[in-house]
Amino acid sequence: MFKLSKFFHFKRSNLLYLVISLGILLWCISIGSAFTHAIAAQPSPILAQSQSLPPLGPNRSTVEAGKELYVSTCSGCHIAIPPEVLPTETWQELLENPHKHYGTSVPNMIRLSQILIWDYLKTNSRPIWLRDAPVPYYIEQSRYFKILHPRVEFSEPITTKSCVLCHPGVKDFNYRILTSEWEDAP
Ligand code: HEC
Ligand code: HEC
């Protein structure tokens, strides 16, 4: 007669070990999967925080609106000047005194336009480098304009009319594109 106990007689203790190890293995797998579930369900505290934090600096859409308003308000008589060529102090003076503008007056400068344009200009310009240095009222006097033109030796006077000589995108307020002679120059 076939007897299971007899058949397994020799290996019974081994079978016991096998069952115990299988049990431990299953336990590990279940703990592991519970752990991953817990992690997936809850984003890490740092991620959760960064998602609810407001963006740094002024609201981006406000700055975009300020940019559009700047270009439309400040390109009526001359080109819209890129903010980075003049220090923040210059822009502040000009915005605070729209009725004393180089012998003329800037129209349509209501309080809201002033605030929005200021947001844009402040975000995109730097304060004066040296303390107590005079505020430049012309691009030609601005240190930042020179710093932005490391390759250029200006022979002609620098005015709002001369930018287009090398910047063909002036009409679209694009100062990245250069004429081919500068684009190809080393
Ligand atoms: C009503 C016409 C008019 C409008 C609009 C106007 N400007 Fe002017 N702007 C002038 C005149 C005129 C000059 C002097 C140009 C000169 O002396 O060669 C000038 C010169 C400037 C200069 C000095 C440019 C240089 O040659 O270095 C800056 C900077 C400037 N304006 C900024 C602005 C800003 C910012 C706005 C919008 C808030 C604006 N302008 C709107 C008429 C205007
Ligand atoms: C004689 C040619 C020339 C003239 C005129 C000129 N620029 Fe430029 N500009 C350049 C070149 C070239 C560069 C790239 C930097 C370099 O190689 O020096 C540049 C770079 C710039 C930049 C930086 C662009 C960027 O990639 O961020 C700004 C802003 C700018 N110019 C504004 C002006 C304004 C405003 C005027 C007029 C008042 C002007 N430039 C006149 C040649 C010129």
Image (tube, rainbow, N blue to C red):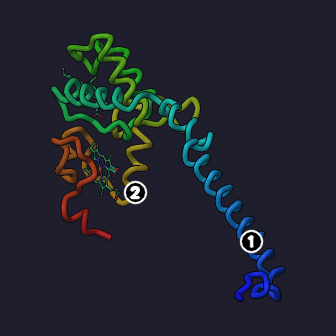
- The x, y position of residue 105, in whole percent, is 23, 15
Residue behind label 2 places its C-beta within 8 angstroms of ligand 2: yes
The residue that disc 1 covers is 19
Please, is residue 174 above or below residue 125 in the view?
Answer: below
x and y, in percent, of residue 76 in the image: 16, 26
- Nearer the camera: disc 2 or disc 1: 1
Percent position of residue 138, x then y: 34, 33
Three-letter amino acid code at the position of disc 1: Val
Among all residues in the image, which is located at the extreme front? 1
The picture quadrant where one finds residue 90 is top left
Q: Residue at x 22, y 23 (%)?
A: 73
Q: What residue is pinned by disc 2?
A: 150
Q: Is residue 73 above or below residue 49?
A: above
Q: Quadrant of the N terminus?
A: bottom right
Pick the front one: 177 or 25: 25
Residue type, mark 2 in image:
Pro
8 in relation to 185, above or below: below
Is 138 left or right of 156, judged from the image as shown?
A: right
